[in-house]
Image (cartoon, rainbow, N blue to C red):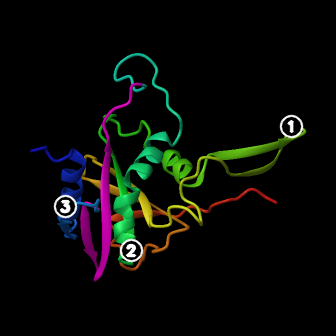
Amino acid sequence: MTSKPEAEDIFESFCDSHAVSWKRVPVEKTRTPDYIVSLNGQSFYFEVKQIDEDDNFKMSGGVSSRTVGAHIRQKILDSRKQIQVGAKHGAPSILLVYNNLDPMQLFGTEQHDFIAAMYGEMTVELKDSRIVDSYHGRNSLLRDDHNTSFSAVGHLRHSATGPIVRLYENSFARNSLNIVSLPPCFEVVYVEVTQRAA
């Protein structure tokens, strides 16, 4: 028997501390999300992943380096099948990522990591040493024709006051977040997606 990931304990604690009704989705032969959560009469599916290791992270001494968004991109890729299950039921489906690697919960899970993984790396176009355009460029995993089953990708973290969930809405979601159904314990970040000018 494998032990339950810390991320799942933290998510359950978050739900319990905010009186959010949750239950585990029964394990099947095919991949399924981890949880179904009832919020103001609407069902939401949650898949919870955690970052456990990265050879580039130096706990003490040394310099840590990473590609912005790489950890989140990998978790999006790893959870597509689970997220699709909830989306096929017409319910918002959310990936939560917990940073079990960095005690500060920053390495690979800062806001710009989520936005770069979802919408692409922020790109600046220069002409004659002037900025002429800026937009989300390459390496986007959520687009109007790709991974629309994700309603949001979120950061699950612990704090001195208890667990916190910050959701980054997918602008291209098939089943968008219903802000009316979300209690205030869920912090939601809306991102204006800028595309390259024609």
Q: What secondary structure is the magenta-colored segment mainly? A: strand
Question: Pointer 2: what residue?
Answer: 88
Q: Are discs 2 and 3 less than 8 Å apart at CB?
A: no
Dividing the image into 4 quarters, which one contains the C terminus?
bottom right
- Categorize mark 2 by other alpha carbons within 10 Å: few (<14), some (14-19), many (20+): few
- Categorize mark 1 by other alpha carbons within 10 Å: few (<14), some (14-19), many (20+): few
SS of the residue under disc 3 = loop
Q: Earlier in the sequence, mark 1 or mark 2?
A: 2
Quadrant hosting residue 184? bottom left
Q: Which three-letter amino acid code belongs to the residue tagged 3?
A: Val
- Give the camera-side residue of 135 and 146: 146
Question: Pointer 3: what residue?
Answer: 27
Q: Which residue sits furthest left?
A: 1
Q: Which residue sits furthest bottom?
A: 41
Question: Pointer 1: what residue?
Answer: 129
The answer to whether 38 is drawn above or below residue 15 in the figure is below
Q: Residue at x 74, y 56 (%)?
A: 196
Span shown in magenta: 33-55
The answer to whether 109 is drawn above or below residue 180 in the figure is above
Q: Residue at x 22, y 60 (%)?
A: 29
Q: Residue at x 54, y 52 (%)?
A: 115
Real-space CA distance between mark 1 and mark 2, rounded to the nearest whole angstrom: 48 Å
Residue 168 percent coordinates (x, y): 47, 59
Magenta span contains residue 166? no
Q: Earlier in the sequence, mark 2 or mark 3?
A: 3
